[in-house]
Image (tube, grey):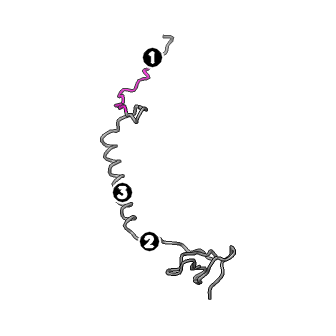
Amino acid sequence: MNGRTKTSLRAKVAPRRKKITFGDVSIWCDVPSEADVKRNASEGKAVFLRLLKALQTPGVDLEFKKDVPYFHAAPGKPGYLIRTLNGNEETVVLKNGEFVVCE
């Protein structure tokens, strides 16, 4: 063989393969090892517990930035808004495309 050695291109240990079908489409994939399954289950549980904690915490934390107004509906006053700007709150309405402070 001209001084060359023949090498095998096949892996010594072939991974287990499995066919998965979604409707009319089928794919072949490697079956994960038992260690991979355990690790993924553990990581998935940790993510789920973090998500569960976040979903059980009511409300939303807002970061109020300087010179950026924040608006929310005025309780019990349809059509009115509360504008918070740099720590000051004002009741406003929208007239002709502009916010007008109510006194």
Q: Nearer the viewer, mark 3 or mark 2?
A: 2
Residue matched to label 2? 59
**In front of the other: 35 or 24:** 24
Q: Badge 3 local density, few (<14 within 10 Å), some, or many (20+)?
A: few
Residue at 34%, 43% in the rendered image: 36
Tag 3, which secondary structure? helix
Residue at 36%, 52% in the rendered image: 44
Q: Quadrant of residue 55?
A: bottom left
Q: Quadrant of residue 35?
A: top left
Nearer-N-terminus badge (3/1): 1
Residue at 59%, 83% in the rendered image: 91
Q: Nearer the viewer, mark 3 or mark 1?
A: 3
Residue 92 location (% of width, % of height): 61, 81
Q: How many marks?
A: 3
Residue at 44%, 71% in the rendered image: 59
**Direction bottom: furthest residue:** 103
Main SS, magenta region, reads loop
Residue 72 location (% of width, % of height): 54, 75
Q: How much space separates mark 2 and mark 1, taking CA atoms?
A: 68 Å
Nearer-N-terminus badge (2/1): 1
Residue 15 location (% of width, % of height): 36, 31
Q: Is residue 77 left or right of residue 56?
A: right
**Direction top: furthest residue:** 1
**In front of the other: 55 or 30:** 55
Q: How much space separates mark 3 and mark 1, taking CA atoms?
A: 51 Å
| Tags 3 and 1 touching, CB below 8 Å | no
Which label is found at residue 48?
Answer: 3
Tag 1, which secondary structure? loop
Nearer-N-terminus badge (3/2): 3
Q: Within the magenta stretch, is there residue 15?
A: yes
Q: Which residues are magenta?
A: 7-19
Residue matched to label 1? 6
